[in-house]
Amino acid sequence: MESDDESSHSKLTSDVIEVHAMKLEDIQAIESKHLIQTYARQPVLFVRGNGSKLYDDRGRQYTDFLSGIGVNVLGYNHPLIRRVFQEQNDLLHVSNLFYNAYQGPLAARLAEVSGFDRAFFCNSGTEANEAAFKLARALNFKRGNKTKTKIVAFENSFHGRTFGSLSATGTKKYREPFEPLVPGFIFARQELEEINSKIDDETAAVIVEPIQGEGGINPFPADLLQALRKRCDETGALLIFDEVQCGLGRTGKVFVFQHYNVKPDVLTLAKPLGLGVPLGVVLVRDEVATGLAAGEHGTTFGGGPLACRLSLDFLSMLIDGDLLAQVQSVGDYFKSKLELIRSNNPEIIKDVRGQGLMLGIELSFPGKPLVGAMLERSFVINCTHEVVLRFLPPYIISREEIDSMLRELEGALQHEYNTRQTD
């Protein structure tokens, strides 16, 4: 006779098998009933991946040009990730009340390659930006500058969805349903006059994406980044670079600020940092780190052993291997091919933007239908800012995969344009 424990185990095993056997329609039915509907998902159920390929529940293969919104930069089923998961499965979490073997060494490695001194680890880019804002205000509070609390962000920016980071997000549609938000945040246009007038002696910090991601793949003008650095120095404001989406090799250098010879006071990173395991970080100089003391900020999961070990191995591969050269070379190739398609279709593509493997094309019409059309053609892409097709492929993407995708993309663009002309 089966014991209660054996019966429970048998039922659990049966339940797991049943879930694994579910198809897209089954999952859609469950989610429509039990999930808060915060996502407009594409109608596909991915069940596994390998390299730059994804496979759905029916075995169909797709080439990934989004990499989990810039996260899976080594693609899927990479040997590094498999090895770390196998070796680290005996210690996944202990909390930040204790030491773990990888958080300190990861902070040291990041300090070495970035030129900053100290790190605070968290779970995401949003959390990293929240920590940066708290740090900026706390630093001035401790220095006796209790009115120096203003935080300047830029129009069209995206820094996250929690209350502080949302307050710094310069896109109205994200903010409006949740107002009133955190006071003290203002927005500037990407203009010298705006920078000089809105950053003043009451400004605690200025946050900027060197390349806006959600805002449509918009590189911040290099001369204005120089102007930002100068104005922050004049007013004593901290300059925060949000490199959550654009950093860690995406542009062909480890950090985007290295392209411009402009070093921020605070750097926030996430997305690829943990190779799919949630991990974010704030990097600062010693004098800025004094803003936070023990007990003034923290996180349960941030900087856990698994995420930090993955990140350490990833950084070694990124810095010591040939990934950066690959990103630069293949990124230049990709962009040149996009420019060629634009020259052949000026009525469809208004602009090609970006750097490395963070690229976008601005269309003359809404881009969302193209996402579905390309999915039907077995390619995963994304649309942001209504009219910009965004490409964030894994760093291992090949020229051949780019060529295959672009052949299908040009056909899909022309079909969508012609359809709109006849409607």
Image (cartoon, grey):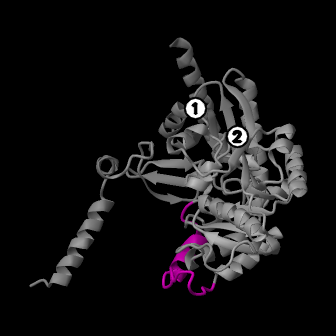
- The quadrant of the image that shows the N terminus is bottom left
Give the dominant element type of the magenta stretch: helix, strand or loop: loop
Q: Is 80 a magenta residue?
A: yes
Q: Is residue 302 above or below residue 365?
A: below
Q: Which mark is residue 351?
A: none
Indicate the quadrant where residue 302 lies: bottom right
Residue 347, percent from left and from top: 69, 20
Where does the magenta region start and end?
76-101
The foreground one among 99 and 29 is: 99
Kindly state the secondary structure of the residue where label 1 is placed. loop
Q: Is 146 a magenta residue?
A: no
Residue 218, percent from left and from top: 73, 41
Separation of disc 2 and disc 1 at Cα?
21 Å
Residue 241 is at least partly visible in this image: yes
* Residue occupying the point 81% across, 63% down: 265
The numbered mark, 2 or 1, whose residue comes first in the sequence reads 2
The mark closer to the camera, 2 or 1, is 2
Q: Is residue 64 left or right of residue 363?
A: left
Query: What's the amino acid at mark 1?
Result: Gly
Residue at which label 1 appears:
367
Residue 67 is at least partly visible in this image: no
Residue 333, percent from left and from top: 76, 44
Kindly state the secondary structure of the residue where label 2 is placed. loop
Residue at which label 2 appears:
155
Q: Is residue 351 above or below residue 264?
A: above
Q: Badge 2: few (under 14), some or many (20 or more) residues near its Cα, within 10 Å?
A: some
* Residue occupying the point 75% across, 73% down: 289
- Residue most toward the top? 422
Residue 309, percent from left and from top: 62, 77
* Residue occupying the point 64% across, 35% down: 388
Q: Is residue 92 left or right of residue 107?
A: left
Indicate the quadrant where residue 338 lies: top right
